[in-house]
Amino acid sequence: MWSFPIVRYEAVQEQVETCEESLHSLQEQVLISNQRFPQIQSQVANLTARLEPYQYLHDRGLYTALSIRLLGEELSQLETDITFVHSQLNNAQSKKLTKEVVKLHKDVQKMQTSDTVNMKTVKEKLRFLKNNVESCKSIPKHFRGQHKHCLKGLITNISDPVITKINPYDKNYISGSWGKQAQMDSEWDKETYWVQVLVSSHIYGNTFRLYQTYKDFMRSANHREVTFASSTTVSTSIEGPSAVLYGKGLYYHCYRSADICRYDLQTNDVKRVTLPGTGVGFNNKFPYCYYDCRANSDVDVEADETGLWALYATVGNHGNLVVSKLFWDNSSMTINVSQTWETRLFKKAASNAFMVCGVLYATRYVGDYKEEVFYAFDTATGKEDNSLSVPLEKVAKGVASLSYNPINRQIYMYNDGYLLAYQAYF
């Protein structure tokens, strides 16, 4: 009655076979995608975790351009992979994963373009401007008129040691500080010498010695033993080789803190002030190093023609040296911080430092018997000079402390148990 549509049947059969082949191919692709999906999920989770510390560093400007670029390239490849998988699966889970990868990639691109290109310059400019602002601040009344004692220019030469002697306690006490009373207009005896050694693990101490004359000091005779803390492990004991005798007060780094202490020789009272900055280093976080690190030399107190200074490093300044101006207020009987400058010198790249006329000088290890003044930072202008090369002879390898005395323009070194003094020339 009717003829079988053989031609149409064969065409439909061919289409079905083609569809079966396509379906089989798609099933294989979906199977592969399903197998790869957990791996990609794991990769995204891993990259997310890896990006978190970069975000932390990004917030503080500590990441490197190379690390971010490599992470961006890896994310680009992952984005290509997840796009392919999403085209095969096209479900809510693959869509969510695609969005996460795209967001991660955008975050990294933003960190690349806005920060590594612009922020480095902006941050450096900001540091420069901050230092300029600090330099423009008025000098506290306590220090006005004292700049007349400063000579023009930087230090040009340092003599051979004019004093060389073993500390009066014992040669085995390799860490400490010493010098001569450093306040130029002090009513206190300007000829007083002092020695402070760190007796507990070469890190902590609670006493120091006073000598009324140079002759007594050289003979280690007729000294006065002063105890400024009840033990070496209380809040008012000293941590690290950091002391300076300024007027009637011994200034030093307080035990396990970001504080500067002042012990009053007349009243025996101890006052303190906390140093400014984000993450002030103490307890051996940012010691002087260069060759060998000097244990717990994180905070250094210095004196010069303009007054008192604290030298230290902070996390906020990436471990670079920070200089803060200190002054003692007789009316309120408090230590205060008036100004702060941030330098670009990594503190662990210096073996020690001292101040002269508002200029920070840093030293580095040259050999067992020589140091070198290689860096200067002027707080008056905010300018730096890292091309200095002023030799400093020594008799032992390690330098525990360096300090300058503005009265006689001598530099005092505590050199692994030896006490050395030098004359500075400008």
Image (cartoon, rainbow, N blue to C red):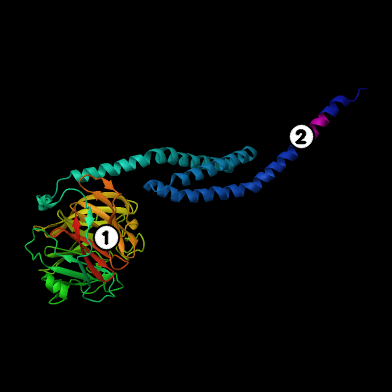
Whether residue 246 is visible, yes or no, is: yes
Q: Which residues are magenta?
A: 12-21
Residue 112, located in which quarter of the rendered image? top left
Does the magenta stretch mainly form a helix, a strand or a loop?
Answer: helix
Q: Is residue 15 magenta?
A: yes
Whether residue 91 is visible, yes or no, is: no
Q: Nearer the viewer, residue 172 or 121?
A: 172
Name the residue type under label 2.
Answer: Cys
Going by the image, does 126 lie left or right of 261? right
The single residue placed furthest to the right in the displayed view is: 1
Residue designated by label 1? 392
Q: Nearer the viewer, residue 408 or 104?
A: 408
Identify the residue at image location x=35%, y=40%: 121
Residue designated by label 2? 19
Identify the residue at image location x=40%, y=38%: 117
Marker disc for residue 51: none
Q: Nearer the viewer, residue 415 or 177?
A: 415
Picture coordinates of residue 267 (x, y %)?
A: 10, 68
Going by the image, does 331 lie left or right of 127? left
Which quarter of the image is occupied by the N terminus?
top right
At label 1, counting other C-alpha atoms closer than 10 Å, the crowd grade (few under 14, some 14-19, many 20 or more) is many
Name the residue type under label 1.
Answer: Leu
The single residue placed furthest to the front in the displayed view is: 160
